Amino acid sequence: MVKESNYIIAIDGFSSCGKSTVAKALAKELNFAFIDTGAMYRAVTLYFLRNKVDFFDESAVREALTHIKIDFVPNGETTHILLNGEDVSLEIRKMYVSDKVSEVSAIKQVREVMVAQQQELGRRRNVVLDGRDVGTTVFPHADLKIFMTASPEVRAKRRFKELQSKGDISTIEEIRANLAHRDHIDTTREESPLRQAADAIVLDNTNLTPTEQLKFILDRYNKI
Ligand code: DC
């Protein structure tokens, strides 16, 4: 049967579970676009920090959002994220952004604007999106929903390695604390908290290699 609309694959889960790695590989394998929704919230956070936007001032937040333009530009194996034309792909991964991103992504107006942009991106072509609320709020009718988890220790170690490779000097304790803080805010916030969609397939990747994770998802995809 030929499908009339495009395909949407939603990959949600906790921070540092390896969602982006597997989502990127999946998008490449299927020739779909890849949208890292967390990167969008990070770019907004960076803009707010640079422009000293008061997170609690509703009108300042609303006004600031009208000045933010986010674009994704594929570049070989990676996708770069542009904030008002500036490549901020590396800057948004730094700890000072990670420290504030959960607070910014809990703001209602921020989520409304980001969700609308993500839906627009998904209307145009086949996409793999990774985030927290893709399968529950952004695309509740996604063709395939994966909910990723991994043990907190493995997640902290993965993020530590990733940051170290980028020259970041954060300690494993700082990373552990940041992950616990973000898990708490992400799961308890009022606006689309992180939760598993009823029809999502759980993928615990604590002991799985990237290749095994990709195979797990491709096997499910091939059944739809
Ligand atoms: O995936 P990440 O760690 O780069 O995401 C950064 C933050 O953005 C995360 O702490 C929660 C938030 N986020 C969100 O609220 N909704 C999404 N769809 C994606 C990320």
Image (cartoon, grey):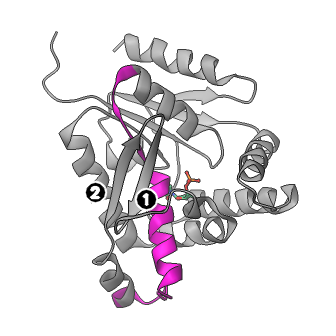
The answer to whether marks 1 and 2 mark residues whose Cβ atoms lie closer than 8 Å is: yes
Amino acid type for the residue under numbered disc 2: Gln
Assign a secondary structure to mark 1: helix
Residue 9 is situated, as x and y percent measured from the top left of the image, at 38, 32
Residue receiving disc 2: 117
Q: Is residue 200 left or right of residue 9?
A: right
Asked whether 37 or 84 is in front, the reply is 84
- In the picture, the disc for residue 78 is none
Label 2 near ligand 1 (CB < 8 Å): no
Instruction: Locate the N terminus by quadrant.
Output: top left
The image quadrant of residue 108 is: bottom left
Image coords of residue 10 (percent x, y):
41, 36
Above or below 140: residue 105: below
Camera-nearest residue between 46 and 10: 46
Q: Quadrant of the C terminus?
A: top left
Residue at position x 61%, y 18% from top? 211
Find residue 87 and report its horizontal and vertical position in percent: 45, 61
Depicted 55 relative to depicted 206: above or below: below
Q: Quadrant of residue 69?
A: bottom left
Of labels 1 and 2, earlier in sequence is 1
Hey, what amino acid is under mark 1? Met
Q: Does residue 53 show up magenta in the picture?
A: yes
Would the CB of label 1 be found within 8 Å of ligand 1?
yes
Q: Residue at x 54, y 15 (%)?
A: 215
Pointer 1 residue: 40
Q: Position of residue 15 (x, y in %)?
A: 63, 49
Determine the secondary structure under disc 2: helix
